[in-house]
C-alpha cells in the first residue's frame, strides 16, 4: 500500500515538473 502511494506521488510530482518545463519553453 505504501509503495503504491509512493509511486503515484512520484509520478504526479514528475508530471508537474514536466508541465512546468514545457510551460517555460517557448
Image (cartoon, rainbow, N blue to C red):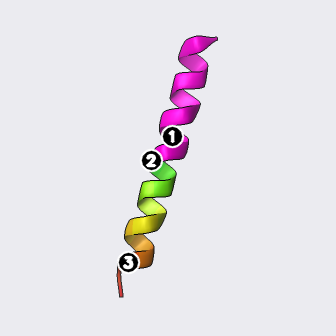
Residue drawn at (55%, 44%) of the image: 12
Residue drawn at (42%, 60%) of the image: 18
Disc 1 crowd rating (10 Å Cα; few below 14, some 14-19, many 20+) is: few
| Quarter of the image with the C terminus in it | bottom left
Identify the secondary structure beneath mark 3. Answer: helix
Of mark 2 and mark 3, the one earlier in the sequence is: 2
Q: Which residue carries the number 3 mark?
A: 24
Q: Which residue carries the number 1 mark?
A: 11
Query: Exactly how many numbered labels are in the figure?
Result: 3
Percent x, y for residue 16?
Answer: 50, 55
Label the magenta part by its dominant secondary structure.
helix
Viewer-side label of 1, 3 = 3
Q: Gap between marks 1 and 3, in whole Å?
A: 20 Å
Percent x, y for residue 4?
Answer: 59, 20
- Answer above or below: position of 10 versus 16: above
Q: Which residue carries the number 2 mark?
A: 14
- Answer above or below: position of 21 versus 7: below
Instruction: Give the residues drawn in magenta, as a range.
Output: 1-13
Amino acid at each position: 500500500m505504501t509503495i503504491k502511494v509512493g509511486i503515484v506521488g512520484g509520478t504526479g510530482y514528475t508530471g508537474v515538473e514536466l508541465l512546468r518545463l514545457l510551460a517555460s519553453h517557448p
